Amino acid sequence: MEKARQKLIVALDYPSLEPAFEISQTLAPLVGMFKINIQLFTAAGPAALEKIRQLGPEIFLDLKFHDIPNTVTGAVASAFSLPGVRLLNIHTLGGMEMMRAAASVRDASKIPPAQRPRVIGVTILTSMDNAALKNVGIAGPASRRVVALARLAKKSGLDGVVASPQEARAIRRACGKDFLIVVPGVRPSVDGSTGRAAKRPKDDQARIATPGQAIRNGADYVVVGRPITAAPDPEAAARAILEEIASALP
Ligand code: C5P
């Protein structure tokens, strides 16, 4: 179970620190990382990391930086000084120079290499389909762009990417075994509170997979939000997901 726990990232998609901290207290023994996004960070700032980090699990700082290389260099340096950050992300569409700038901050960090935050890339937002891409002048299909951008991220020195469960396998093939793949859009097959097959609401996720499928497709980490945080019994939901992860591990 310890191996499975390390692979589970719970998304704290909350408007303020209080509810995020409350659920984190319940879930801390069961998760490897908590994910803090732009909503919570904009509302609560570094205090969110300081408080949540004290519970044990590390932090995935999901702020998706996308700016000129000089500005991203500064932002990544600031993120490296926050407590408990294990993963942080930037947009690959910011270009190679921007990605290289972020990787340089990591490489120059005084933090011992094994404990340094890993810098990962967002390829194409899963909310964008081929038509939405065409609208902004990017030729599709999205799936091909995703793999090309993952390769570019690797070439630029990033540690990995965020990817949908459907893209994970192709990215693993293209980028090799040491490239981190972090997979959201995960929906459990078992309902933790009843032990029966889950109803699996998709919410607004278009491309979903079970935790087991995501791991078998090559995910190093799975990101789960509402299936745990909005469950009647979040702890039971997290335990059921851990079991699904554990049973898919080699
Ligand atoms: O509640 P749910 O499990 O859908 O939450 C998934 C989390 O992963 C959210 O924080 C969401 O913003 C994030 N995410 C995602 N799809 C992506 C990238 C990030 O759902 N492609």
Image (cartoon, helix red, strand yellow):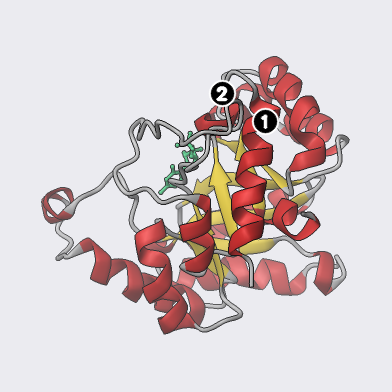
Q: Which mark is residue 231?
A: 2
Disc 2 + disc 1, Cβ < 8 Å: yes
Res 158 quadrant in image = bottom right
Upstream in the sequence, badge 2 or badge 1?
2
- Residue at screen point 70% across, 49% down: 79
Residue 132 image position (x, y, % from top left):
16, 48
The nearer-to-camera label among 2 and 1 is: 1
Residue 186 image position (x, y, % from top left):
47, 46
Amino acid type for the residue under numbered disc 2: Ala
- Residue at screen point 67% across, 17% down: 19
Residue 54 image position (x, y, % from top left):
88, 36
Split into 4 quadrants, where in the image is the N terminus? bottom right
Mark 2 burial class by Cα count in 10 Å: few <14, some 14-19, many 20+:
some
Q: Which residue is mark 1?
A: 236
**Secondary structure type for disc 1:** helix
Q: Answer above or below: position of 163 versus 225.
A: below
- 203 and 232: which one is in front? 232
Q: In whole angstroms, how far apart are the C-alphas of marks 2 and 1? A: 9 Å
Q: Answer above or below: position of 174 versus 194.
A: below
Q: Is residue 53 left or right of residue 135?
A: right
- Residue at screen point 60% across, 71% down: 159
Q: Is residue 248 visible?
A: yes
Q: Answer above or below: position of 187 versus 121.
A: above
Q: Is residue 43 left or right of residue 142?
A: right
Amino acid type for the residue under numbered disc 1: Ala
Q: Is mark 2 within 8 Å of ligand 1?
A: no
- Residue at screen point 70% across, 29% down: 235
